[in-house]
Image (cartoon, grey):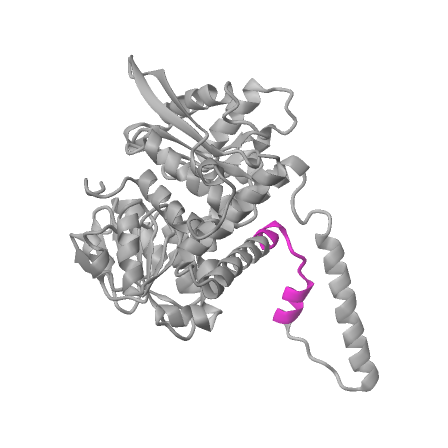
Amino acid sequence: MLNANEPSFRESVDIMFNRAVETIDLPPGMKEKIRVCNAVYTVRFGVRLRGEIKTFTGHRAVHSEHMEPVKGGIRYATTVDSDEVEALAALMTYKCALVDTPFGGSKGGLCINPRDYDEDELELITRRFAYELIKRDLIHPSQNVPAPDMGTGEREMAWIADQYARMNTTDINARACVTGKPINLGGIQGRVEATGRGVQYAIREFFREPLDLAKAGLHGSIEGKRIIVQGLGNVGYHAAKFLSKEDGARITAIIERDGAISLDQGLNIDDVRDWITKNGGVKGFPGTDYHENGSALLEADCDILIPAALEGVIHKDNAAKIKAPLIVEAANGPITSSADEILREKGCVIIPDMYANAGGVTVSYFEWVKNLSHIRFGRMQRREQEARNEMVIRELEHLSDATGDKWNLSDDFRTKYLRGAGELELVRSGLDDTMRSALQSMRALWHEREAVTDLRTAAYLASIEKIAASYKAKGV
């Protein structure tokens, strides 16, 4: 819970928006048009469970329809309220504009603890919630497309997609009503890992630019850098796994609900994840130091801090104690506006949430396009690409024989070169390109405009300028 003296999550988003928008000149009224949430729908519905009718409250916010459909996840949590979904919907608007996905921003949530119900009960609740949204076109392939969020996943998206299909039996594009589905129900490879993979690509792109590293007081590569991850859910797990296994970073601490564990030489992320799955938390994980007050490790020495769980975990009471020179917001809103100001004054560099965790919506966009096109990525060109690559290899080998100087191509090179790109490779390529391009657009503002002193302001400006251009083109 946020300190009572802190701005709410929605207020923090507005404060950061206002700080950025003051640096540019927009037509009268355009700033307010972009800032405000267009609509919030609240539904209360009953489901018969365990011999009685239980009433649930859900919300779906539509922030901006400068592009349609609007896009945004559905979360299941006891903290869900209309203010939270409004803030998250606003971030989705700015996020989609920043990474050039053609969506407006939306978000939804159900005030529920999913751990309190078994699978059959959750299916009944999810289908009824979906029914209430679908009949008002708040779930629709061309108007409003949800995705997984905290507390939901492929299973819930499959139930929602099936509920939509049952209610719209002649809609040939029914599968495009929601993203984050299982592969065998129209999902796309790489979607589960997408947000964490996007965090990795964001950090990689940051480390490619010496000017960025200098601002954070860092140097060199990701290899060997000490990283603390708060929250080992889907996003935190995949980000930590890829950064440690593929880039050589050391995950020196994991912060979870029941405390934190630390190990200076680096934790094995898969082993920690398995332990949490079996034991419900990190306590007791062998060979590490356990810290009952897990949030205290947000203030520990490290090179990169990745808050990947809830909003508001870094606030005005602990911001001054944060030692990490680089913070990557894998979660939505983990830093309050008050803390953001304190950290910027300290010289801490923050890679903001609307960019850092945009991998999810980027790959959701790919899934949506796949569903509308009714064909798997790579299906038409993969074998043709392999045939052309094989022709090149054969010609090279023929030329080497003709000159008497035999070229010995390694089996590993031959295998990798001959293999055509399938769906997963294309998804990762598209995500990498998206994350690189977005940070480059932010970087240009950050380094070239005197009024832009941080990446968050740069991200807001890059987004707002695109949104304003869309409204202007529509005649608004």
- Counting from the top left corner in percent of width and height, residue 410 is at 64, 75
Residue 421 part of the magenta-drawn span: yes
Looking at the image, residue 289 sits to the left or right of residue 108; the answer is: left
Q: Is residue 326 above or below residue 197?
A: below
Queried whether the magenta region covers residue 253, the answer comes back as no
Which image quadrant is residue 121 in?
Answer: top left
Q: Position of residue 173 (x, y in %)?
A: 63, 29
Residue that protrudes farthest toward the bottom in the picture: 404
Residues shaded magenta: 412-427
Q: Quadrant of the N terminus?
A: top left
Residue at position x 59%, y 40% from top? 472
Vertical position of residue 117 compared to residue 325: above or below: above
Residue that lies at the very extreme toward the front in this rendered image: 28
Q: In this orientation, which residue lies closer to the viewer: 337 or 415? A: 337
Residue pictured at 47% horizontal, 36% vertical: 33
Residue 147 appears at what percent x and percent y?
Answer: 47, 36
Q: Image check: 213 left or right of 134?
A: left
| The C terminus, quarter of image | top right
Q: Looking at the picture, how far across and down is residue 227, in whole percent?
A: 33, 63
In the image, residue 76 above or below residue 377: above
